[in-house]
Image (cartoon, rainbow, N blue to C red):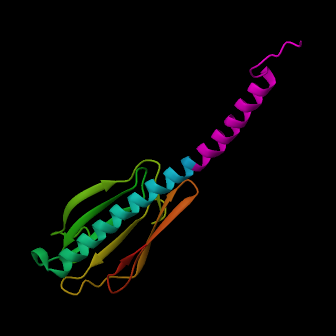
Amino acid sequence: MKNKKSGFSLLELLLTIAVIAVIGAIGSGFYIQFSRGIELDETAKAIVADLKLARENALAGKNQMKWGIRFTNASQDYYELFSTPTVYGGVSSTIVSTTYLNSVISFDTPTSSTSLDVVFSKISGNTTSTSIVLRRDTLTKSINVATSGLIYQ
């Protein structure tokens, strides 16, 4: 009679661990890229919601003012929701809220050290056609505003 040994050899165990490690490394790379994309999408959705709020306020003629958002590309990118009788920064302009972007997300448009204003006319909701581009590492997301005031991604 032969002695029959049962169980796994050290080589089989090492190969199994190596295969699991490779699959885990590939999977974690996909997960990281996926989560970055979600974070960028959520930031874009928040900006779209604020743009729509500014347009709705302008359409309603709230406070008899134009409404808009100023996007500022600075050391920490941010945007401000404001109301104004003419343009951003006028004497009667009021900043309603300021929102800072997550430190890993930045504006591509407007470019570095510049600002971009999207101002909706009262009652009509019209504005100047423009795009806001967000960046997270190699991923980008565009938000477009048409002259009619329609906002889309």
Give the prevailing secondary structure in the magenta stretch.
helix
In which quarter of the view is residue 58 placed?
bottom left
Residue at 25% across / 83% down in the picture?
125
Residue 135 on image: x %, y %: 50, 59
Residue 90 is covered by the magenta coloring: no
Does 137 sit above or below residue 96?
A: above
User: Looking at the picture, how far across and down is residue 22, in whole percent?
Assistant: 70, 39
Q: Is residue 19 left or right of residue 115?
A: right
**Residue that appears at 44% across and 74% down:** 131
Part of the protein shown in magenta: 1-30
Report whether 71 appears left or right of 106: left
* In the depicted structure, whether residue 2 falls above or below residue 47: above
Please name whichever residue, 132 or 17, is drawn nearer the observer in this view of the structure: 17
In-front residue for pair 145/108: 145
**Position of the N terminus by quadrant:** top right
Say which residue appears at 33% left-offset and 87% top-offset.
148
- Answer with the quarter of the image where residue 27 lies: top right
